[in-house]
């Protein structure tokens, strides 16, 4: 509840202080709205507005950027965002700053993406799954078990096709800066350990807002409900849902162990995390500051991934230490059960995985063998 109030207060402040008329465009993430929003966002108006919004003086910052995420401050998304902020400030002698707000304070991942298009914030990082509502280019990552190892995922993300996907929405107001990572997703629930797909039968599971994720759980007999991250803890607590699926760092930093008994290391999907800056805001920056922002993002990415590696280990220790029961099911039965998703979704057409993109990802994976 508190978060909601703060989010509304922040949004009002941002609208009133910085972006004249941004409220009236809410919902229509059109290019022109983005253009008008960010025209106002560049320059000193942005600096004074966001300094007020963050409640602290930002000194001499000419460009005070605001970032939003859906995760707690201790999650690697936030550590990575803060690292970008630290590096960009250093590289520009304080002329460009970045304040990051976690915990969905500035809205859900969908809101954050729209916020960049509307100009109400400048940077975000989100799982690729909710981008399905905006573009089809990231859908290849929503194929279950497309990656078996973190190394495979990172190699694809850093490859030519990975970079093309990252930059596929530059002209929709979302300029890709680098790939952060969320990681392999695992199922938690309150009913029983998930050892085979059949164990999911009848289980009410929250998924991200993504058709392919829902279809995968439907095929296994579960009852998926799409929901924004900010509502998950309460829904688990109140028993509206029995289960959710996320990487260990998300589970541990959100303290889902307080409301979930079992964690099953299914690793059924890998969530990559693009870092976006509002394209118009970026385009309006002086060239040297553009370089500084890009370099800061490039340097923060390996640090962010390292935090994921560390929290995958420490987070699981924390979860089991707090009483969760962990099990590691054999992956093959889950792979077989979800295989029809490949036939259903790899084809030309809206909402589908482009066969060309899929093939190029497979080619990178084959080249690693
Ligand atoms: O992107 O919504 C989710 O389950 C995501 O994993 C999370 O918000 C981070």
Image (spheres, rainbow, N blue to C red):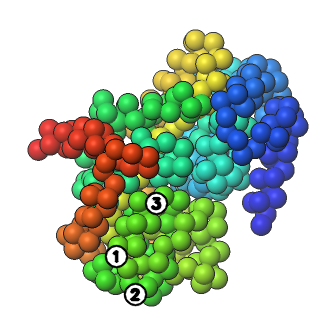
Q: Nearer the viewer, residue 324 or 191?
A: 191
Q: Position of residue 63 (x, y in %)?
A: 71, 23
Label 2 CB less than 8 angstroms from ligand 1: no
Between marks 2 and 3, how big is the CA–CA gap?
Answer: 25 Å
Looking at the image, residue 252 lies above or below residue 364: below
Where residue 192 is drawn, which disc sits there?
A: 2
Q: Earlier in the sequence, mark 2 or mark 1?
A: 2
Q: Mark 2 near mark 1, Cβ–Cβ under 8 Å?
A: no
Q: Position of residue 181 (x, y in %)?
A: 43, 47
Q: Residue at x 49, y 42 (%)?
A: 135
Where residue 60 is drawn, which disc sits there?
A: none
Helix, strand or loop at label 3? It is: helix
Could one spot residue 238 in this view of the protein? yes
Residue bearing the label numbered 3: 211
Helix, strand or loop at label 1? It is: loop
Q: Position of residue 5 (x, y in %)?
A: 82, 58
């Amino acid at each position: 509840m508190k978060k909601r109030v703060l989010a509304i207060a922040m949004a009002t402040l941002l609208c009133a202080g910085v972006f004249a008329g941004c409220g009236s465009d809410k919902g229509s993430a059109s290019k022109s709205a983005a253009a008008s929003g960010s025209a106002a966002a560049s320059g000193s108006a942005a600096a004074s507005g966001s300094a007020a919004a963050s409640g602290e003086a930002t000194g001499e910052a000419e460009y005070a950027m605001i970032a939003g995420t859906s995760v707690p401050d201790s999650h690697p998304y936030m550590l990575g965002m803060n690292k970008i902020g630290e590096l960009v400030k250093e590289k520009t002698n304080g002329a460009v700053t970045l304040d990051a707000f976690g915990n969905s304070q500035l809205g859900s991942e969908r809101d954050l993406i729209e916020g960049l298009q509307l100009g109400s914030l400048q940077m975000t990082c989100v799982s690729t799954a909710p981008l399905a509502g905006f573009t089809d280019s990231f859908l290849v990552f929503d194929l279950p078990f497309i990656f078996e190892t973190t190394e495979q995922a990172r190699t694809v993300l850093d490859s030519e096709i990975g970079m093309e996907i990252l930059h596929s929405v530059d002209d929709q107001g979302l300029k890709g800066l680098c790939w952060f990572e969320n990681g392999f997703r695992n199922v938690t629930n309150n009913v029983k350990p998930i050892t085979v797909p059949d164990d999911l039968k009848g289980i009410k599971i929250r998924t991200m807002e993504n058709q392919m994720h829902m279809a995968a759980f439907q095929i296994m007999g579960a009852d998926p409900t799409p929901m924004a991250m900010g509502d998950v803890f309460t829904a688990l607590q109140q028993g509206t849902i029995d289960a959710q699926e996320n990487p260990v760092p998300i589970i541990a930093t959100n303290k889902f162990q307080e409301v979930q008994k079992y964690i099953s290391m299914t690793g059924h999907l890998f969530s990559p995390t693009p870092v976006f800056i509002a394209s118009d805001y970026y385009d309006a920056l002086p060239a040297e500051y553009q370089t500084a922002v890009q370099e800061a993002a490039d340097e923060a990415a390996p640090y962010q991934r390292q935090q994921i590696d560390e929290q995958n280990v420490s987070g699981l220790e924390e979860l089991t230490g707090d009483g969760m029961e962990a099990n590691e099911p054999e992956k093959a039965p889950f792979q077989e059960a979800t295989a029809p998703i490949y036939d259903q979704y790899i084809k030309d057409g809206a909402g589908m995985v482009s066969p060309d993109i899929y093939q190029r990802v497979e080619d990178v994976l084959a080249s690693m063998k």
